[in-house]
Structures are given as C-alpha cells and as structure tokens.
Image (spheres, rainbow, N blue to C red):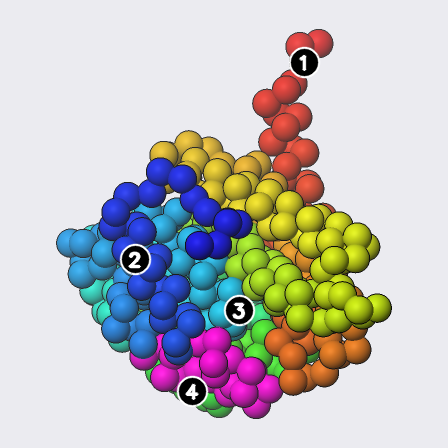
Amino acid sequence: MPRLAQTADLTDVQREILATVRTFVHKEIIPHAQALEHGDVYPAEIVEGLKELGIFGLTIPEQFGGLGESLLTYALAVEEIARGWMSVSGVINTHFIVAHMVVHHGTPEQQQRLLPRMATGEVRGAFSMSEPGLGSDVAAIRTRATRTDGGDYVIDGQKMWLTNGGSSTLVAALVRTDEGAEKPHRNLTCFLVEKPAGFGQVLPGLTIPGKIDKMGYKGVDTTELVFDGFRIGAEQVLGGTPGRGFAQMMDGVEVGRVNVAARACGISLRAFELAVAYAQQRETFGKPIAAHQAIAFQLAEMATKVEAAHLMMVNAARLKDAGARNDVEAGMAKLLASEYCAEVTTQAFRIHGGYGYSKEYEIERLMREAPFLLIGEGTSEIQKTIISRGLLEAYAIER
C-alpha cells in the first residue's frame, strides 16, 4: 500500500471512485502514455474510457445526469490521472471549469441545455481568457463583442492558449462589452460559444488555426481562437446578464488552481515512484544507489515535498467544498505544488543519471511536463500577489 499522498476521512463512495480511476490509469494510461506523448497523438481511446467511467460528469449535479461529487473527489481523481499522464488530466480540466461555471452561474435554460450533455462528454468544454501579449492582465482584454440593433452580438478579436481548442464543442470565452462601467473588469462578459470540433473555419467568423507546438503537454491540443465578425445570440451570455464575466471566470480559475495543484501532485508522486524504484535497482560501488546517503537524503526530501503539496491541495479543495473563501489557500496550494513538482522531477531526473535524458525513460517526459504547471492558471508570481493581498486584508492593522 503506497504511503504517500493518502487522504483521510474519505467516504466509501470516494474511495471506490478513486480505486476505479487508479485501476484505469494503470491499465489504460501508463502503458500507452509514452508512445502517444512522443507522437503528439490525441488520446481518443483513453477519453472514451473516461466517458464510460463518468469522469466528465463527476462534479455535475445528479439532476443533470452527473455524479454530483465534490471538488475534493475531482481533485484526487485528477491527481491519479496526472500521475499516469498529465495531458489526459488536461483534456478534462477545462471541461470541468466550464461545467462548474454553468452550474454556478448559468441560467436555468443554459443548465438544462448543456449540463446533461456535458455529463456524458458529448459536449466538451474549453476555457478562453488569455490573448496574445495579454498574460495575466485580464482587465486589458481587447477582444470585443458589439451589440447589434437586433440584440445579438458580433465578436472580433483573437484569443490565445486555448486548451482543447480543437477538440471542444463549447468554449467559455471572456470578451469586452460596453457596459459603461468605470472599472475595466466590469465591462467583461463571458459567452458560451457552441461550435463543432475541428480546425480551420469551424463556423462563419470563427477560426481555430491549428495546434500550437509545445515543449511538453503533448496530445492535448492547445490553440488560438480567432473571431472575425462572429455573430452570437444574447442568450449565450453566461447567466444572461453582460458585464459579470470577470467574476464568473475568476470563480472558474479558483477551482482551476486546485486542479493544477492536483496535477502537480500527480506528477511529483510519479517522479518519486520512478526515482525510488530506480535507486533500488541501480548499483554503484557494490550496492544500490539508494544505500548511498546522498541519494537516500534526496528521496527523503522528495517524499516530504510530495506529502506537503498533497496536504495543501486537499485543504484548498475542502475549503471550497465547505463554501468558505479559499483564494489564498488555492493560491498557496498551486504555488507550492507546482514549484515542488519542478524540484521533485529534477531530483528524480538526476537520480536516473544519463538514462533520465533518454526518451526511453518516463522521467524525460515528466521533465517536459512539469514546467507547464509553473505558469498554468497564473504564474507563481501571480499566486504570490493573490496570497499577499489576501493576507494583508486578513491581518490589516488599524491606523
């Protein structure tokens, strides 16, 4: 029985779900991840298996055909999946964020129309906030939706770093609308853009140019999204009221940060497993390298980081499930887990020596995947900004 990254006080249902996911990871993901990743091949068969397991509807309420599970259950499932191959967790991450936004902010009509099909994976969600040159300055979004005399909107602009951009059929896109608000973020609106999967001009005025070639995070498609006179109905505004998109997106990003922390925990755990196994097999000077104190101490440090990151991720998820504010805790979990992930994979790489540089060994792939988590859902510097602001608010002194 693994000792690291165990979670106390889970229900029998949670344990059963996680055991099922872990079995699926061992049988269907780990044996195929290397070949699919090296070929940058979309994991279609694995995705179909996840649909059958109900993973796409894990947190969608039962009334809409989902399993109605908590953020914690989802995060722990993601941790297991990322342990097998991070790109697979990326396939479901943006879908999960969009489903969360529709559940908590969508109109009853939007919920009834979208959530049952999202629960089965028939409709697959993507999340679009960033733009070229924009980075984390969300208030500076330039893509604009203009209201027509007939009440519809016409969107023009370019979005960037859209995970599942080609494979998704529903995109939650944050764009600028003219609401007359003094604060820029109150002039932002989230549109639910329904489209067919694929690349090129998928609808009049809507183009997915093609996959962006990346260092890691292969298999899952990352794209641009180009609007050029794209017409969309007012009923596709999330929640039905324009100008609320920033708050809606930030709610999605908050749970997304727990998700990224969970992915980092999964990669860290896998890197440790690979390192501790290799260190007991590889011999130098007549004994396994694990018997050398220099390596044994590295393993101790790695395990401590794995455990600390897991506990912080679980705490952030449980706070959100309890309805408490968790912006600081989610930021802390994402910051620590992603930074530790980079450190643990590097330590595992060094323990493997020259073999770690070979594509035949799994650690080579993890070394290319870990850096993504340092920037996904906000860089470490953005997390520190969020954390420090929250702390200064909580510990403000009277003057």
Horizontally, residue 183 falls left or right of residue 55, namely right
**Residue at the spot 50% in from the left edge and 65% down from the top edge:** 82
Mark 3 Cα within 10 Å, few/some/many (few <14, many 20+)?
many
Label 3 sits on a secondary structure element that is helix
Depth check, front residue: 94 or 89: 89
Q: Amino acid at mark 2?
A: Ile
Disc number at residue 397? Answer: 1
Q: CA distance from mark 1 to mark 4?
A: 54 Å
Q: Secondary structure at mark 1?
A: loop
Label 4 belongs to which residue? 198
- Outermost residue on the front side: it is 286
- The residue to which callout 3 is attached is 86
The CA distance from mark 3 to mark 4 is 22 Å
- Work out how far the residue at label 3 is from the one at label 1, CA to CA, in angstroms: 43 Å
Side of 49 relative to 176 (left or right): left
Instruction: Give the CA distance from mark 2 to mark 4.
Output: 32 Å
Residue 17 disc label = 2
Prevailing SS of the magenta stretch? helix
Q: Locate residue 362, reporting x and y percent.
A: 62, 76
